[in-house]
Amino acid sequence: MAGLRGFTFIFLIYKNIQLKYKQTLFGFVWSLLQPTLYLLIFVAIFSRAFQAIPNYPLYVLSGLLFFVYFSEGTNRLCTVFLKNTHMIKSLAIPKSTYAITEQGAEFVNFLLGLIPFIFIMFFMGLKISFNLLYVIPILLLFTVFIYASGIILGSLNVFFRDIAILWSTLNPALFYLSPIAFSSDIVPPNLRFLVYMNPLFHFLQIFRDVLYFGRAPSLHYTLICLAITVIFFSLAMVIFKATKNSFISNL
């Protein structure tokens, strides 16, 4: 039974990846295009404005990649139950399976895209040391946070279809509130709380500790990220359990 369940998960992850690039000319290459374009734009336009940030391209890329992962993951999970309406109504598979495999597909897609960007970051000045291994647990924690955020959005979107529209509007705003192309130090002190309230700010801090500064992640920000993930995951499970039995009648 466990083997069959594992096969089902792997098959659905594969199908989700396949569907994402179905009938596209360049397939997986498109997933590399978005962060590359953003990087080129930021370096071309803002590198002179932020000369105080050493090695600005590496600074941008070490934050940009993970925001794109967050954005893609939450966008897909926001509509995961609506997208699988027919299967939810016809197959006796736990509803969480669709969300887990959707996130799994996005995780695999991100890892495949991360490989060439790691080489690019190496030429940008990435320090090769054992501290790079910290990326693994941080990325797993970040993935759980994305999954939890997506479950909240996806569950609510079954009942309120405005959620997907609202999230597509808020996502770009969240991008500009995240210190990806700028340092949080330039934000006026009276407005800095807006940046600190953004959960992604704290995750970007520990990713940058490892990839940009070449050091172990800050214990302070790591504990904050752990607390954020636990809170979001707990909230996601409460919302999902309270709504999942009403999915079919609202799909």
Image: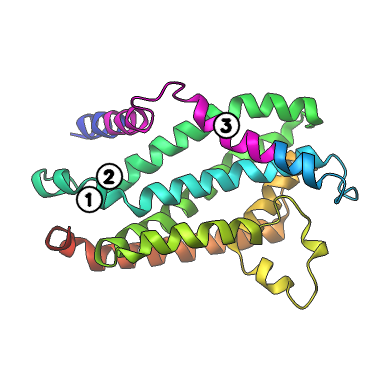
What is the C-alpha distance between the residues marked 2 and 1?
A: 6 Å
Q: Secondary structure at mark 1?
A: loop
**Prevailing secondary structure class for the magenta stretch in the rendered image:** helix
Q: Is residue 36 magenta?
A: yes
Q: Is residue 217 left or right of residue 172?
A: right
From the viewer's perspective, is residue 116 above or below residue 16?
above
Q: Earlier in the sequence, mark 3 or mark 2?
A: 3
From the viewer's perspective, is residue 165 above or below residue 19?
below
Q: Position of residue 11 (x, y in %)?
A: 27, 28
From the viewer's perspective, is residue 243 above or below residue 47?
below
Q: Residues within 10 Å of mark 3 (few under 14, many from 20)?
A: few
Q: Position of residue 73 (x, y in %)?
A: 45, 46
* Label 3 sits on residue: 33
Residue at 20% of width from left, 30% of height from top?
Answer: 4
* Label 2 sits on residue: 98
Foreground label between 3 and 2 = 3
* Label 1 sits on residue: 95
What is the C-alpha distance between the residues marked 1 and 3?
A: 32 Å
Q: Position of residue 132 (x, y in %)?
A: 70, 35
| Kind of residue at badge 3 | Leu
